[in-house]
Amino acid sequence: MTVLVRTNSPEETTDVGARVGRHLTAGDLLCLTGDLGSGKTVFARGVCRALGCRERVKSPSFVLVREYHGDVPVFHIDLYRLGSPDEWSTLGIDDRLEEAVALIEWGELMGSRLPDETIRVEIISCEGRDGRDISITWSDPRMTAIRSSLDIRTPHGKNGR
Ligand SMILES: Nc1ncnc2c1ncn2[C@@H]1O[C@H](COP(=O)(O)OP(=O)(O)OP(=O)(O)O)[C@@H](O)[C@H]1O
Ligand SMILES: [Mg+2]
């Protein structure tokens, strides 16, 4: 199921992230796709907030992976500077993914190595400087609940296609 939602500010994108984040549990993997500066980190901030992380969420571009401590551990990963998908194991998180939620910016660079159950979020700039179209695709039944919480938020009928 794919849900589309439009946001018009960073705060709204963080809020969408939070509405998704509160449905996530240990073992979930979320792939964030979108151009440089599209809002992947801004979205991740909302997910982290919903999962009870109190740390400041900063871009993991240079460190590749940051860990936050919420109701579950949260790995915030940025693959933009990863040399190749083969280097994934150098992140050193494989044996902890089951107990954590992983948010992966540029996750699509892993190609078919991402599990089928991955939640896919794509952010596309639109309508001037601050508009973003966000699509969220997930095969999990929990997606129905996410969709309802996003529907309540947007009275303009931009989402839910
Ligand atoms: N609707 C919006 N949603 C998200 N961010 C927005 C929006 N409108 C403007 N912005 C701005 O766009 C920028 C998004 O930055 P962010 O670091 O989240 O991008 P990113 O996709 O993580 O980029 P990178 O690929 O470099 O990591 C911020 O400066 C934010 O203030
Ligand atoms: Mg980022």
Image (spheres, rainbow, N blue to C red):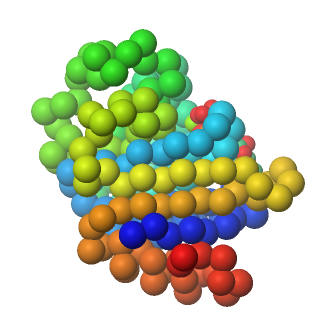
Residue 84 sits above or below residue 42 on the image = above
Residue 51 sits above or below residue 34 on the image = below
Q: State the residue at coordinates (43%, 30%).
A: 109
Q: How many marks?
A: 0
Frontmost residue, 146 versus 137: 137
The residue lying furthest to the right in this view is 128
Residue 81 lies left or right of residue 118; in this view the side is right
Figure quadrant of the N terminus: bottom left
Frontmost residue, 62 versus 72: 62
The residue lying furthest to the top in this view is 83
Frontmost residue, 14 versus 137: 137
In the image, residue 100 lies at what x, y percent?
A: 24, 47
Q: Is residue 105 visible?
A: yes
Task: Please tell me in which quarter of the rendered image ligand 1 is found.
Answer: top right
Figure quadrant of the C terminus: bottom right
Residue 20 sits above or below residue 32 on the image = below
In the image, residue 147 lies at what x, y percent?
A: 45, 77
Q: State the residue at coordinates (77%, 55%).
A: 126
Q: State the residue at coordinates (45%, 67%).
A: 2
In the image, residue 132 lies at what x, y percent?
A: 70, 57
In which quarter of the view is residue 130 placed?
Answer: bottom right
Q: State the residue at coordinates (59%, 81%).
A: 153
In which quarter of the view is residue 114 placed?
Answer: top left
Q: Is residue 68 visible?
A: no
In the image, residue 92 lies at what x, y percent?
A: 23, 23
In which quarter of the view is residue 22 placed?
Answer: bottom left
Frontmost residue, 118 versus 149: 118
